[in-house]
Amino acid sequence: MYGRLARLRLEWYGRLGRDLLARHWQWALLATLLVPGAPIVAPFLKFSVLLGAVVAPGVGMAGHALLAVVIDLAAMLWIMPQRRAVSGGAFMGYVATLPVSRPIRQAVEATMLAVANGPLLPVAGLAAARAAVLADGAYRACGFLAVLGLAALAQHAVVTRRLLPLGGVAMGDLLLAMGLDAASPPARWCLLAVALAVAVAGVGGCPAGLGGRWRRGRTGPGAVMFDRRRIVAPALRVQCGILADRPVVSVLRIGAAVGLAMGGARLVELFDFDTRAIPTMIVAVAATGLLLAGLYCTLSDAHRAAAPYLAALPLPPRYWPLRDTGFLMLVNLVPLAILFRPQGRGLLAVSAGLAVAGQALLVALRWPVLRGGRHRLVLSLVLAAGWSGAAIAAVSR
């Protein structure tokens, strides 16, 4: 089955690729003439240098993250003109009615992405060879392969027109950048594994639909039907779907929390870990908790809208409150890891204590956010301010 489906997809790709090249060959020729140096060779060499810089030492966490995002964007721009050829066209609507297993479909999709990226594979091989000869070459080479895997997942999201996997790719880039800048080898390998797991989980939790559109169920216009994904819990898929249905609020809150954590970590480094470092971390933890606590309302409103349906399911009374709290605690691990990354050696005990206390603050903020009514903002600020004062007083002793 794989051979037949792959052969048909490759024939479709060759036909549309030939037509695409016939329409736009002038632009490709102009681009090669404008690049200095020998045509064909110079663009590949320059791009291989860019690919290798993402895992080069001495760049810093921000530099690693920025280069990884640039590579993802370049990969997405490369695949966009080929999206119709890679996706299979209207033929995939017929394939959807056939008993083709999911592993076979994924293998065919991977084959098509490899063919579409064929001109870039020698560049990636050259960059991987350069990364392998650096200090700590095994980790650098594996990290570079992880960067390529994240870029391929971003391309897959573009081909299938799904936005949710891009969030997992961005989170994977951030975790990978943290690992490349970490000093401890075990922490590096752990962050590398977590980065890949987060990205794969984002792909596993994305909505179904071969045409790339969100498939709506008959129970209501807002209900999203999911494929069965064994690698992601059903509750986690529902929560990710809720946040994906409200992308503006979700991205703003999570992005602001991550940005605040990065700014706090930078301030602590500028303070050179003096007496101002711990109060800065405490304030950053409190502000991050306030930002993420607003997602309690987003999740609770979605559960309330589906209350008639949920009432017919054999769920415990505190099913969603407990899982929503755990979900936000899981999200909060990312800004906490960013914030406490520079203090891994000197302030390990203080960082661990503040991380646990920050998670406790996020749990405590659930009550004023959901029960405070019109005064929930004031109550949340009072609780966060009290927590900050108590934490500063405890640490100062």
Image: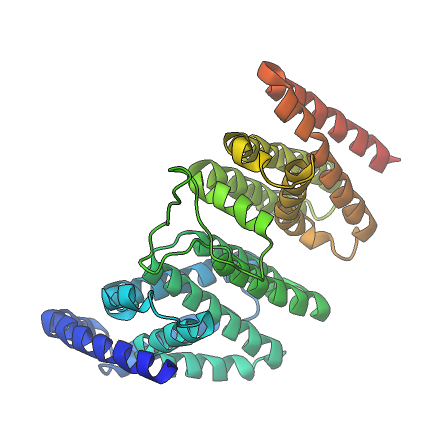
**Tally of numbered tags:** 0
Q: Nearer the viewer, residue 368 or 303?
A: 303
Q: Residue at x 40, y 45 (%)?
A: 217
Q: Residue at x 83, y 30 (%)?
A: 393
Residue 219 horizontal/vertical position (percent): 42, 39
Residue 174 horizontal/vertical position (percent): 54, 57
Residue 58 horizontal/vertical position (percent): 57, 66
* Residue 354 in sight from this viewpoint: yes
Residue 137, picture quadrant: bottom right
> On screen, 271 above or below 126?
above
Residue 118 horizontal/vertical position (percent): 32, 80
Q: Residue at x 70, y 70 (%)?
A: 185
Residue 332, picture quadrant: top right
Q: Residue at x 40, y 37 (%)?
A: 220
The quadrant of the image that shows the C terminus is top right
Query: What colour scheme has been applied to the protein in the rendered image?
Result: rainbow
Image position of 72 (left or right of 376)? left
* Residue 135 in sight from this viewpoint: no
Residue at the extreme right = 397
Residue 9, picture quadrant: bottom left
The quadrant of the image that shows the N terminus is bottom left
Q: Nearer the viewer, residue 302 or 166?
A: 302
Residue at the extreme top = 374
Q: Nearer the viewer, residue 268 or 185?
A: 185
Image position of 375 (left or right of 72)? right
